[in-house]
């Protein structure tokens, strides 16, 4: 056997072409490089799972007033109720199990934050894209309205709207949408102005595509990156704002144990040593907001590498 034939038989097969990394895989790989962001994602996932399965893992439905006993009010952590089960986080002033109330309160907080963010993002993106594509006086009027709203404190606008609309989850969501949409509109309008001057938009116009097709099929997908970052920040802001409004007594009613309501119920007992009524719901609210912000910081760095430290 010749040397050339032997080398041919013993040489390893040539590797095939390396698979192309998709944008989603690239994003996941870059996100996973930050251990703090992964910790935030794991914590947020745990919070979401606890909230989703709250009816199955809690000993009490805090919405059912028939199962709430005033004789069990202000029990410290580890005590037993009249029904015989242990309240590991104690009870509040009306006898609700804090563990059950916190998980049900997380459902309200996450629902309010997600729904208000999605509606505000959709509204703000539509307004920002329309302003950037229309231009002229229409853009000027829209952006002056946006500037006017952003010049006012968000808590002030929310207080006025909730006071006018009344209490309830739907009223809170409407108020938060009005507070948040301007952030999306300004950001999307700035990104759309850059995309509007690019050659692919001119090519689409020369092909006779409608304005709606150009805006929503070509310009909007290239403006989604900053919207995702704003969504994470505004979701945490919406959750904290809902808790603030409920703590002030203008958000959700006492019959709906949101985190803000639970914190407000225990505030009057802090000086008497019953710390658990406010402390544990406050800790749950803090962990939720921190986990969202940790993910948002990393998403911002991945989508805009120039901001990465």
Image (cartoon, rainbow, N blue to C red):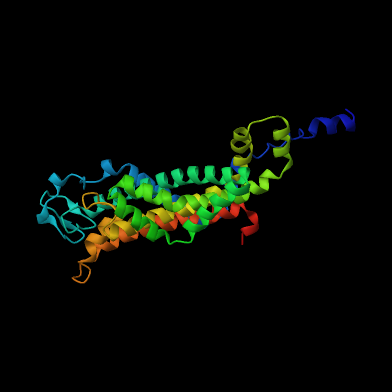
The answer to whether residue 301 of the structure is visible from this angle is yes
Quarter residue 8 falls in? top right
Measured as percent of width and height from the top left, residue 99 is found at 25, 52
At which x and y percent is residue 209? 66, 30
Say whether residue 178 is left or right of residue 204: left
Camera sees residue 284: no
**Residue 256 vertical placement versus 7 (above, below):** below
The residue furthest bottom is 271
Q: Residue at x 57, y 54 (%)?
A: 300
In this rendering, the answer to whether 211 lies above or below 26 is above
- Residue 250: x and y, percent? 28, 56
Side of 54 where 44 appears, left or right: right
Q: Residue at x 31, y 42 (%)?
A: 53
Against 24, is 38 above or below? below
Residue closer to the observer: 272 or 132: 132
Residue lying farthest to the top in this orientation: 1
Residue with the most extreme front position = 137
Front one among 261 and 166: 166
Expressed as whole percent of the image width and height from the top left, the position of residue 212 reads 59, 34
Seen at 26% across and 62% down, the residue is 278
Q: Quadrant of residue 73?
A: bottom left
Q: Quadrant of the N terminus?
A: top right
Image quadrant in which you'd find residue 90: bottom left
Image side of residue 267 versus residue 305, left or right:
left
The one nearer the camera, 48 or 304, is 304
**Number of marks in the rendered image:** 0
In the image, taking residue 98 as reference, residue 139 lies left or right, namely right
- Quadrant of the drawing holding the C terminus: bottom right
């Amino acid at each position: 056997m010749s040397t050339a034939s032997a080398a041919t038989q013993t040489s390893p097969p040539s590797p095939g072409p390396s698979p192309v990394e998709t944008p989603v895989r690239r994003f996941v790989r870059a996100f996973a490089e930050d251990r703090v962001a992964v910790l935030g994602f794991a914590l947020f996932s745990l919070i979401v799972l606890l909230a989703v399965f709250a009816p199955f893992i809690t000993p009490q439905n805090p919405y059912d007033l028939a199962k709430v006993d005033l004789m069990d009010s202000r029990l410290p952590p580890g005590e037993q109720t009249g029904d015989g089960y242990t309240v590991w986080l104690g009870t509040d002033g009306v006898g609700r199990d804090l563990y059950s109330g916190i998980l049900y309160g997380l459902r309200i907080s996450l629902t309010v934050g997600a729904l208000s963010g999605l509606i505000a993002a959709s509204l703000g993106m539509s307004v920002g894209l329309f302003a950037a594509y229309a231009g002229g006086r229409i853009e000027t009027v829209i952006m002056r309205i946006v500037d006017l709203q952003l010049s006012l404190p968000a808590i002030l606008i929310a207080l006025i709207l909730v006071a006018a609309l009344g209490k309830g989850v739907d009223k809170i969501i409407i108020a938060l949408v009005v507070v948040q949409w301007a952030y999306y509109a300004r950001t999307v309008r700035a990104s759309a102005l850059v995309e509007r001057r690019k050659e692919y938009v001119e090519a689409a116009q020369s092909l006779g595509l409608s304005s709606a097709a150009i805006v929503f099929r070509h310009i909007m997908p290239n403006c989604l990156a900053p919207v995702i970052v704003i969504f994470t920040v505004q979701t945490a802001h919406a959750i904290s704002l809902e808790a603030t409004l409920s703590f002030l007594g203008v958000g959700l009613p006492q019959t709906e144990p949101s985190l803000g309501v639970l914190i407000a119920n225990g505030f009057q007992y802090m000086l008497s040593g019953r710390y658990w009524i406010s402390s544990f719901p406050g800790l749950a609210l803090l962990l939720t907001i921190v986990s969202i912000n940790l993910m948002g910081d990393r998403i911002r760095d991945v989508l805009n590498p120039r901001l990465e430290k």
